[in-house]
Amino acid sequence: AVSQSVPYAQRRAAYEQSIRACPSELHLYTEFASLQIANHDFTAALPWIEKGLRLSPEDAILNLRKGEALVALSQPREALTALGKTPATGESQFFVGLAHQLLDEHREAQQCFLDAWKRGNQDPYVLYSLMLEDKALGDKAAGVEHFQTMMARFPDSVWIHVLLGDAHFKQHQDA
């Protein structure tokens, strides 16, 4: 199940078999949930996450994975409930920000993305998400600052091209 050289379907079957054999081993649920989330199998992950949470309702990793899956499935309120049971980390704050973004709660999303960045989640998509919130809030100064950070830190990021494409499109420069 843990061998990354094995195809996802086989790993999934191995985790299911392992959990059937050792249903009280919490680490199997957290590992399996992480595997499913990494493979974008969000709907399938939720029942296994719930089974693991029955063993340990406050488990931070399972609640984080649950929040991540629920954000991906456009269930932001439920995601915020799960993410509220996790410590504030760069990863958790990013998903809290995405949940707020889905709810059009732009100020909260902006603050969460900033916090995620400060806590070490220094990924170009965090900056891109932050710039979307800067734009939604009309915070041009923050948007320019975050764009400059993006250019300096991630000059080859696809998200720069998305932002520039959006800017040209907005100026009716479709070509």
Image (spheres, rainbow, N blue to C red):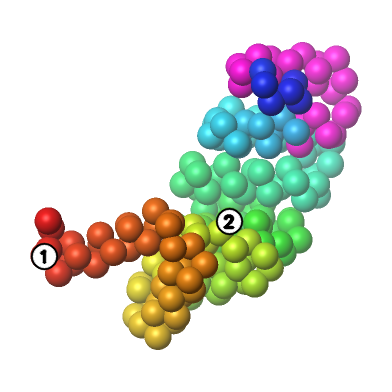
Residue 123: in magenta span: no
Q: Work out which quarter of the rendered image holds the N terminus and state it.
A: top right
Residue 168 coordinates in the image, percent (x, y): 19, 65
Residue 174 coordinates in the image, percent (x, y): 13, 58
Residue 102 coordinates in the image, percent (x, y): 44, 57
- Residue 67 circle label: none
- Residue 172 circle label: 1
In which quarter of the view is residue 113 placed? Answer: bottom right
Front residue of 59/173: it is 173
Residue with the most extreme bottom position: 141
Residue 15: in magenta span: yes
Viewer-side label of 2, 1: 1
Q: Mark 2 points at which residue?
A: 95
Mark 2 packing: few (<14 Cα in 10 Å), some, or many (20+)?
many
Q: In this view, does 85 lie to the left or right of 175?
A: right
Instruction: Name the residue: 43% across, 69% down.
Output: 151
Q: Is residue 37 above or below residue 121?
A: above
Disc 2 or 1, which lies upstream in sequence? 2
Residue extent of the magenta highlight: 7-30
In which quarter of the view is residue 175 placed? Answer: bottom left
Residue 145 coordinates in the image, percent (x, y): 45, 80
Instruction: Name the residue: 48% across, 71% down.
Output: 152
Mark 1 packing: few (<14 Cα in 10 Å), some, or many (20+)?
few
Q: Callout 1, which amino acid?
A: His
Q: Distance between the residues labelled 2 and 1?
A: 33 Å
Q: In this view, does 116 lie to the left or right of 85?
A: left
User: Is label 1 in a helix, a strand or a loop?
Assistant: loop
In which quarter of the view is residue 133 placed? Answer: bottom left
Q: Can residue 162 be seen in this view?
A: yes
Instruction: Name the residue: 73% across, 16% down.
Output: 14
